C-alpha cells in the first residue's frame, strides 16, 4: 500500500505541474490556459459513515447502529474542463462496534484527490451544464480519538489509531451558477485493521469505511469556466490564399501591358465621378461559435466605412449555421447569436446607429454556400 501511495502521490504532483502547461484538448477543442488564481473553489458538507471491520471482529449489529456522523471541508481547483485536484479535511464519529473494542470512536483525517469529470471528458464541455459526474482517487491519513476528542492511551503498537488511507469515490455535482454548486458524494476508503484497536499483534489486514456526504461549493473569485482557443479556420486560409494568387496573376498581366499606345485614337478626358460602391461582405465563424475572430473584423470595418460614406444606407445582417453540425433547434439559436454579435460590433465598435441595422437568422434551413463549412456565416445585405 505504501508503494502504491507513493506512486499515486507522484502522479498528483506531476499532474499539477503538467496541467499548467497544457490546458485541455477534448473533442478537437483546445482551451486557453487560465490564470493561477482562476477555477478555485471551497466546499463544505456533512453526512454519515459506516466503518467495516473484518473477520472475527465483525459485530452482530444492525445497519443503523453502525452509522456514524461526519463533516468535511475541501479546497480544490479545476486545471482543465476534465481534470482537477482537491484537498479534503474531514472528521466525525464511527460506530464500528467490533468485539471487545470501544463501541464508538471519533476521528480526524484528510486526503488529497485527483478528480476526473466524465461528462466533459467523454462528451463536450458546456459551462452551463447542471449535472456532472466526477470520480476521484487519492491518498490520505486518519487519526483516531476517543469519545472526548482526546488522544487515546498510548499502545505499544505504533499503528493503532493512525493509518494511511486509500480513497476512491464519486461526486455528483449540481451547478446552480458559475460560482455555486450542490454536491452529493459517495466515498470508500481503506485503512489498516489496527485503526480501530483490533487486530493488534496479528497479520496486517485492512478495514474500510463507506462515506456519504452532501453540501455546497463556492467559487473563490476569479474565472470559473474555460474559454476555447480561437484556432485558424483552414478553409478560410485557403480561400484567402486563392484570392491572393488571383490578384498576383492579374497584377502580372497588367505589368506586361504597354505603358503607352501611340496608334490609339485620342480620347477626350471625361469627368470622373467618385461613387462609393458596396461590395458584399461576409463574416465566417468557427464551428459552434458566435465569437467574431480578429481576421473577420475587416468585413465589419468595410461595411461600417461604406455606411459612414453613405448616410442613407441601411444594412440587413442574415446569419446561418451549417447543416452537418448540431440539431435544427440548436443551429437556429446559434445563427441568431451570430447575427446579434455582428450587429453589436457595428454599433459598439464603429458607431453605426442601431436604427440603420436589421438582423435575420436562418439556422440551417438555408445554405447559401455549397461548401458546408462556409455556411457558418453572417452576410451583409445593404439597402
Image: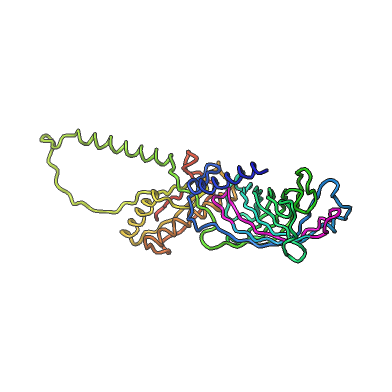
**Front-most of residues 361 and 198:** 198
Percent x, y of residue 302: 34, 53
Can residue 320 be seen here? Answer: no
Identify which residue, 261 or 168, lies in the foreground: 168
**Residue most toward the left?**
262
Is residue 109 visible in this depiction of the protein? yes
Q: Quadrant of the C terminus?
A: bottom left
Left or right: where does residue 17 sit relative to residue 8?
A: left
Name the quadrant containing residue 233.
top left
Coloration mode: rainbow
Picture layout, residue 269 above or below residue 153: above
Q: Compared to 86, does 231 lie above or below?
A: above
In this view of the protein, which residue sits in the foreground, 138 or 259? 138
Whether residue 115 is in magenta: the answer is: no
> Which residue is at the far front?
156
172 displayed left or right of 78: right
Q: Residue furthest right?
A: 60
Point 37% across, 63% down: residue: 351
**x, y percent for residue 162:** 70, 54
Left or right: where 278 falls relative to 52: left
Chain part drawn in magenta: 76-104
Q: Position of residue 180 (x, y in %)?
A: 61, 62
Residue at the location (35% across, 54% down)? Answer: 301
- Looking at the picture, does residue 95 appear above or below residue 321? below
Query: Which residue occupies 55% across, 62% down?
Result: 220
Using residue 26 as the reference point, say whether residue 139 is left or right of it: right
Q: Position of residue 369 (x, y in %)?
A: 47, 41
Question: What is the total number of numbered labels drawn onto the structure image?
Answer: 0
- Quadrant for the N terminus, please: top right
Amino acid at each position: 500500500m505504501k508503494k502504491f501511495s507513493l506512486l499515486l502521490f507522484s502522479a498528483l504532483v506531476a499532474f499539477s505541474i503538467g496541467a499548467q502547461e497544457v490546458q485541455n484538448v477534448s473533442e478537437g477543442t483546445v482551451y486557453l490556459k487560465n490564470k493561477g488564481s482562476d477555477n478555485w473553489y471551497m466546499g463544505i458538507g456533512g453526512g454519515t459513515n459506516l466503518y467495516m471491520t473484518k473477520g472475527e471482529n465483525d459485530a452482530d449489529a444492525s445497519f443503523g447502529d453502525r452509522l456514524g456522523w461526519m463533516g468535511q471541508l475541501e479546497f480544490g481547483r479545476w486545471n482543465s474542463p476534465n481534470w482537477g485536484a482537491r484537498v479534503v479535511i474531514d472528521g466525525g464519529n464511527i460506530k464500528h462496534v467490533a468485539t471487545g473494542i470501544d463501541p464508538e470512536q471519533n476521528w480526524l483525517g484528510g486526503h488529497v484527490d485527483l478528480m476526473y469529470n466524465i461528462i466533459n471528458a467523454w462528451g463536450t464541455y458546456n459551462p452551463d451544464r447542471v449535472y456532472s459526474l466526477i470520480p476521484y482517487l487519492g491518498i490520505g491519513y486518519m487519526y483516531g480519538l476517543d469519545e472526548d476528542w482526546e488522544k487515546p492511551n498510548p499502545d505499544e503498537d505504533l499503528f493503532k489509531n493512525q493509518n494511511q488511507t486509500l480513497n476512491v469515490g464519486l461526486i455528483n455535482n449540481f451547478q446552480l451558477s458559475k460560482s455555486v454548486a450542490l454536491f452529493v458524494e459517495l466515498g470508500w476508503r481503506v485503512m489498516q485493521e489496527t485503526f480501530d484497536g483490533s487486530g493488534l499483534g496479528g497479520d496486517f489486514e485492512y478495514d474500510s469505511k463507506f462515506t456519504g456526504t452532501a453540501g455546497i461549493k463556492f467559487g473563490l473569485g476569479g474565472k470559473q469556466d474555460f474559454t476555447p482557443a480561437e484556432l485558424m479556420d483552414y478553409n478560410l486560409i485557403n480561400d484567402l490564399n486563392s484570392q491572393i494568387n488571383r490578384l498576383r496573376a492579374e497584377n502580372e498581366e497588367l505589368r506586361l501591358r504597354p505603358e503607352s499606345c501611340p496608334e490609339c485614337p485620342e480620347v477626350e478626358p471625361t469627368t470622373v465621378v467618385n461613387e462609393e460602391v458596396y461590395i458584399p461582405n461576409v463574416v465566417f465563424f468557427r464551428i459552434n461559435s458566435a465569437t467574431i475572430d480578429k481576421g473577420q473584423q475587416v468585413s465589419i470595418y468595410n461595411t461600417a466605412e461604406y455606411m459612414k460614406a453613405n448616410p442613407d444606407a441601411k444594412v440587413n445582417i442574415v446569419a446561418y449555421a451549417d447543416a452537418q453540425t448540431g440539431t435544427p433547434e440548436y443551429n437556429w439559436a446559434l445563427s441568431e447569436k451570430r447575427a446579434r454579435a455582428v450587429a453589436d460590433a457595428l454599433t459598439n465598435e464603429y458607431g453605426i446607429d442601431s436604427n440603420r441595422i436589421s438582423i435575420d437568422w436562418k439556422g440551417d434551413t438555408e445554405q447559401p454556400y455549397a461548401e458546408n463549412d462556409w455556411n457558418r456565416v453572417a452576410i451583409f445585405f445593404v439597402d
